[in-house]
Image (cartoon, helix red, strand yellow):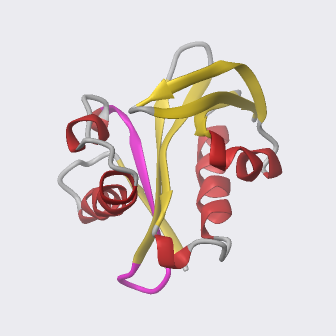
Amino acid sequence: MFIAHTKDTMSTIYLDAVKIRQQVFVNEQQVPYELEVDAYEAYTIHFVLYQALETPVATVRLLPLEDGKVKVQRMAVLKEFRSQGFGKAIMKEAEKFAAEQGFQQIVLGAQLTAIPFYEQLGYQIVGEEFLDAGIAHLMMEKPL
């Protein structure tokens, strides 16, 4: 297992990230493609976890915000690879990267079904429930 990251939207890493997101968000969750791939693609750092040399199984992206914050977005693990620790591994790598870049807080909008996963990683719920792409979410945060 290894994790790679990029800001280059022409790279294989980015294209692998989009393939995972397409499968999980567009195909499984019925999120419209035009909402899934958005105007922030070129401003984010895209991470992909590879199970073997060429098997991308998980992705996440980080969007730098103001005031020392960074936002986790588009966290996804392919269905056949869930519950094997890949989500935790890629989140830990993204958090480590964010801390190394000097960010002090990490925030995210979690789908309600993912709340226990993020709580296990030390995130706390802040704010009220909201809809994103028609799916209920809660904001969560964690100091780095």
| Residue 33 position in % (x across, y down) | 22, 44
Q: Residue at x 75, y 35 (%)?
A: 144
The quadrant of the image that shows the N terminus is bottom right
**Relative to 16, residue 137 above or below:** above
Q: Residue 23, located in which quarter of the rendered image? A: bottom left
Q: Residue at x 33, y 43 (%)?
A: 31
Q: Residue at x 74, y 21 (%)?
A: 126
The residues colored magenta run 43-55
**Relative to 6, residue 35 above or below:** above
Q: Nearer the viewer, residue 20 or 116?
A: 116
Query: Is 47 within the magenta?
Result: yes
Q: Residue 102, located in which quarter of the rendered image? A: top right
**Relative to 28, residue 45 above or below:** above
| Residue 92 position in % (x across, y down) | 68, 55
Q: Is residue 75 left or right of residue 108?
A: left
Q: Nearer the viewer, residue 129 or 57?
A: 129
Q: Residue at x 33, y 32 (%)?
A: 43
Q: Nearer the viewer, residue 19 or 102?
A: 19
